[in-house]
Image (spheres, helix red, strand yellow):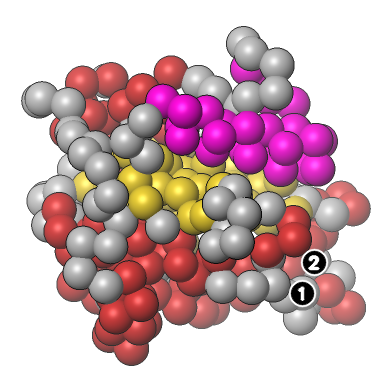
Amino acid sequence: MELAARAETIREAQALRYRVFGQELGAKLKTAQSGLDLDEFDDYCHHLVVRETKTGQIVGCTRLLHDINARRLGRWYSESEFDLGSIRNLPGRLLEVGRTCISAECRHGSAIAVLWSGIASYIHLHGIDYLFGCASVPLGDQDHLAAAVMSRLRHQAMATQHLHVTPRSPLFNSQAPDNLLDTPIPALLKAYIRLGAKACGEPCRDPDFNVADVLMLLDVDQLNPTYTRHFLDRAGPNSMYRGPAHLNSA
C-alpha cells in the first residue's frame, strides 16, 4: 500500500480504473487518452494504491481530495451529481474519496481492506474531521434494485435531514417489489456503513455508469472503534508513506 509519488504510479492507477470502469463495467468514460481513465481532478488528489505482493501490479486504488486542494480547484468531484451545500458548511477538515476500484481477481481477497486501512491512516495523520464520497448502487430493471437498497438505507444508515444533499438527477417513483427487499448492499456501500457513515439523502442517477450514486458521509468522531483499530493496526505506522506526496498550497 502506498501513496503514489511518481507520475508512472498514477498512470498505473488510471489504467486499472480504465480496465474496471470502461472495459469491465462498460461505463462511458470522458477521457482524453486511450487506455486511461483520467480527468482534471487527478492532479489535485492523492492516489492511494494497493499492489499484489508477488507481481507488484496495482490491484486496487482510490483517490483522496483534501479540502485544501478542493478549494484550489474550486469544487469537489461529487458536485457534478449533488448540491453539496450542507457538506461544504461542515466545520473542520474534509476529505473526499472517489474513483475506488479493485481488479476482478482480487475482489474476494484483502485488497479492499488494505485500501481502507490506508484511508484510515490518512485520516489519522492529516487530522480529517469528515470523510465523504459516492457509493454506487445498480439500478436494475425499472430502478428496482436501487430502490430496494435505498429502502434498507433509510432504515439503517440515513443521516439527519440537515446533512442531506440534493441530487441533480434524482430517481423518481421507483418502488422495490417484495422479492427484492433483501437485495444485498454493494461492498463499498457496506464498508462505509460498517465504519459508521450515513447516507445523505436520496441518490443521483449516473447514466455514464448506469448506476445510482449515494453520497455517504462519515463523521470521524463517530467512527466505529472496532473497525478503526482493525484498519490502523493493519496499516501500521506511516505505512503508506513510501515517497513524498504533498498537498498543494492553499
- State which tag comes first along the sequence, 1 or 2: 2
- Which image quadrant for residue 236? bottom left
Three-letter code, disc 2? Ala
Q: Secondary structure at mark 1?
A: loop
**Residue 16 image offset from top left, x and y in percent:** 63, 40
Asked whether residue 135 appears in the rendered view, the answer is no
Quick one: 92 or 128, which is closer to the camera?
128
Is disc 1 surrounded by few (<14), some (14 to 19) or many (20+) residues within 10 Å? some
Q: Main secondary structure of the magenta part?
A: helix
- Residue in the image at 18% along x and 33% along y: 247
Residue 25 part of the magenta-drawn span: yes
In the displayed image of the protein, which residue is found farthest to the front?
54
Circle on res. 63: none
**Residue 96 image offset from top left, x and y in percent:** 35, 45
26 over 97 or under it: above or below = above
Three-letter code, disc 1? Thr
- Residue in the image at 63% along x and 32% along y: 15
- Residue in the image at 90% along x and 53% along y: 141
- Which image quadrant for residue 210? top right
Contact between marks 1 and 2 (CB within 8 A): the answer is: yes
- The region drawn magenta spans 7-31
Does residue 136 appear left or right of residue 184 in this picture? left
Residue 108 part of the magenta-drawn span: no
Residue that carries the numbered disc 1 in the rendered image: 183
Circle on res. 176: 2
Does residue 74 appear left or right of residue 208 in this picture? left
- Which image quadrant for residue 194? bottom left
Quick one: 124 or 84, which is closer to the camera?
124
Asked whether residue 32 appears in the rendered view, the answer is yes
175 over 30 or under it: above or below = below
- Residue in the image at 64% along x and 73% along y: 109
Task: Compute the Cα span from label 1 to label 2.
Answer: 10 Å
